[in-house]
């Protein structure tokens, strides 16, 4: 028997018991006579003692122990002496006097300490991931991931859902990002694709009468990576038949309430707020607003339509907008800092960032001279500015204005401490546009994906060509400015789906090639259906307060899609390539 207990289990109720523990040597302390070892496993740390008076040969053997050696010990539990109690750990009241030691495996000196407080480069952490995962925080993250997935499964099982796996090797049906392709040895020149999502299969399951489906699904997208994006990721995928948006909202709100209660001990207030897409863009410049930030954007175009500042006037005449917000307590900001923020806004396409400081009895700015007093008074009132604030303004096309100011609002909120990080703000964003216009390709395309239905009262606008006025039946769930889930009520009519493909420029031949199996299924009675997918990795960063989803995934990739531990992606043998009928590139 390797162990009778774990290293996080023993306490004063076990005094005088004979026990066995196994684990890693976390640290060794030689106090002259006694040698103390902190023995660690996945459950905690227990202090063990080697006493030369009790066993000299065993005490001598303990001198050989080094960090991360794997050992088994047996001994007797006793109270720690007065003054040596460690109340920071659950086993801190006791220690074990060792009478048997087995070294199960030796270890090289690890490249970094198994300590959450030690700073280690991410490259090193990922190269030695098996060591990084030994850290208590990483162990806790993996256990929380397991717990959340279990709560999800139990909650959905209680509500009549069944978990159904869908294929990993499937047909290439690009959904906005590049597919990962897998060559077929048995079908030379042909390829499988790894799924970007189970979208088409879950819709077919509704046609198949499954009624309530879910899956904790692995998804793959070959796209540029960042802190909250991985080439392979996990989502909770849900689809239901004979439902409306309210059914989806009720289900998801109940799920989140249960998750927050069981995983974090937090009682959530239901129902969650709902915010229309256009209102979100108007007030916050983004469709995933952090509404904890007590600052909103204001459209001040009408105030400046006849002003003396040609930059604003020309933008307005060309159909652009002027928007801004009041930077609370920013009036002491230096010119170099303002220039830095200007460059930040330019990264989002803005040509510049106008500003006006609201100081005692005056407004100061390089552009102050271009405005009348009544224009400035109207501006101050519109944005709610007070003494000590800076009013930030951007004039441009509305999309550029919203992107730049929306990003600036979030940046300043983090830098100035405008956000109450102890609060959790969850909102539904609803009534997204069904289409967006691709100016480069001069065509309309789906805002979400082409299987999203529109509001029934907007169907007539399809034939009128008023595509920019059509609202989709899609919805996003946003937590603290992070998109956690996205879904929609789907198109279930074959004729409507054909019309949608045609409107976004997918020919009948192309739609048959890419989605023919779905369209064929729709011939046989597809029920009204809808669903949603939760980004599990992003959700876990919220619970763990992690900066990156790489901290909640056991074996993640870098921003270049590389696994430092396995060195994937890697070269393969020429023999393997020949079997797949692939020629090696230069």
Image (tube, helix red, strand yellow):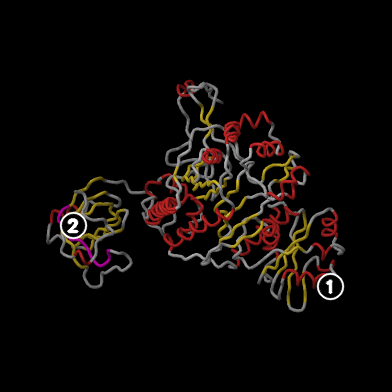
Q: Residue 184 at what x, y percent from top left?
A: 50, 25
Disc 2 element: strand
Is residue 204 or residue 323 the one in the foreground? 204
Left or right: 87 as drawn, with respect to 153:
left
The answer to whether residue 214 is visible is yes
Q: Residue 143 at what x, y percent from top left?
A: 38, 53
Residue at position x 61%, y 41% in the image: 492
Left or right: 513 as drawn, with respect to 265:
right
- Residue at which label 1 appears: 374
Q: Residue 553 at what x, y percent from top left?
A: 45, 48
Q: CA distance from mark 2 to mark 1?
A: 82 Å
Is residue 230 or residue 361 the one in the foreground? 230
Left or right: 122 as drawn, with respect to 344:
left
Q: Can you tell which mark lies on residue 19?
A: 2
Residue at position x 42%, y 53% in the image: 158
Q: Can you tell which mark lies on residue 482?
A: none
Most extreme residue toward the bottom is 361
Disc 1 element: helix
Residue at position x 60%, y 40% in the image: 177
The answer to whether residue 141 is visible is no
Q: Residues within 10 Å of mark 2 (few under 14, many from 20)?
A: some
* Quadrant hosting residue 373: bottom right
Q: Residue 563 at what x, y percent from top left?
A: 46, 41
Left or right: 378 as drawn, with respect to 425:
right
Q: Which sits earlier in the primary sequence, circle 2 or circle 1?
A: 2
Is residue 24 or residue 165 the one in the foreground? 165
Q: Is 92 a magenta residue?
A: yes
Q: What stretch of residues is rendered in magenta?
A: 91-100
């Amino acid at each position: 028997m390797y162990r009778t207990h774990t290293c996080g289990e023993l306490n004063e109720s076990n005094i005088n018991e004979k026990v066995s523990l196994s684990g890693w040597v976390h640290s060794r302390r030689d106090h002259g006579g006694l040698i103390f070892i902190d023995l660690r496993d996945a459950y905690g740390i227990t202090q063990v003692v080697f006493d030369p008076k009790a066993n000299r040969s065993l005490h001598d053997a303990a001198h050989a122990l080094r960090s991360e050696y794997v050992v088994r010990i047996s001994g007797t539990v006793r109270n720690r002496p007065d003054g040596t109690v460690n109340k920071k750990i659950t086993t801190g009241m006791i220690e074990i006097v060792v009478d048997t030691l087995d070294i199960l495996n030796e270890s090289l000196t690890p490249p970094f300490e198994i300590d959450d407080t030690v700073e280690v480069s991410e490259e090193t952490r990922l190269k030695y991931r098996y060591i990084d995962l030994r850290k208590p925080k990483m162990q806790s993250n993996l256990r929380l991931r397991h717990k959340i997935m279990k709560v999800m499964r139990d909650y959905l099982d209680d509500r009549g859902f069944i978990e159904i796996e869908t294929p990993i090797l499937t047909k290439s049906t690009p959904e906005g990002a590049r597919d990962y392709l897998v060559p077929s040895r048995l079908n030379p020149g042909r390829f499988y694709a790894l799924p970007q999502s189970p979208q088409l299969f879950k819709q077919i399951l509704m046609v198949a009468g499954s009624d309530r489906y879910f899956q904790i699904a692995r998804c793959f997208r070959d796209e540029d990576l960042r802190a909250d994006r991985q080439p392979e990721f996990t989502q909770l995928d849900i689809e239901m038949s004979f439902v409306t948006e309210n059914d989806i909202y009720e289900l998801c709100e109940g799920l989140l309430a249960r998750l927050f209660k069981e995983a974090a001990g937090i009682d959530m207030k239901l129902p969650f707020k709902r915010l229309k897409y256009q209102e979100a863009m108007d007030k916050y410049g983004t469709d995933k607003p952090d509404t904890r930030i007590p600052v909103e954007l204001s459209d001040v175009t009408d105030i400046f339509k006849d002003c003396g500042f040609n930059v604003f006037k020309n933008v307005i005449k060309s159909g652009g907008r002027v928007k801004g917000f009041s930077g609370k307590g920013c009036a002491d900001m230096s010119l170099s800092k303002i220039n830095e923020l200007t460059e930040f806004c330019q990264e989002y396409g803005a040509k510049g960032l106008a500003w006006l400081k609201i100081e005692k009895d005056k407004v100061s700015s390089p552009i102050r001279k271009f405005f009348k007093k009544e224009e400035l008074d109207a501006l101050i009132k519109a944005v709610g500015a007070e003494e000590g604030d800076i009013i930030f303004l951007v004039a441009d096309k509305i999309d550029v204005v919203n992107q730049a100011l929306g990003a600036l609002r979030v940046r300043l909120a983090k830098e100035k401490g405008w956000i109450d990080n102890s609060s959790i703000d969850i909102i539904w964003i609803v009534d997204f546009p069904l289409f967006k216009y691709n100016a480069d390709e001069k065509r309309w395309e789906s805002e979400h994906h082409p299987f999203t239905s529109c509001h029934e009262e907007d169907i007539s606008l399809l034939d009128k060509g008023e595509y920019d006025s059509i609202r989709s039946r899609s919805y996003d769930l946003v937590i603290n400015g992070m998109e956690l889930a996205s879904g929609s009520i789907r198109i279930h009519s074959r004729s409507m789906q054909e019309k949608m493909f045609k409107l976004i420029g997918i020919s009948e031949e192309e739609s048959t090639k890419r989605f023919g199996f779905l369209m064929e299924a729709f011939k046989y009675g597809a029920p009204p259906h809808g669903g949603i997918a939760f980004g599990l990795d992003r959700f876990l960063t919220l619970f763990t307060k992690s900066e990156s989803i790489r901290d909640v995934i056991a074996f993640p990739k870098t921003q270049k899609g590389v696994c430092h531990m396995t060195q994937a992606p890697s070269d393969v043998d020429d023999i393997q390539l020949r079997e797949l009928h692939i020629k090696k590139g230069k």
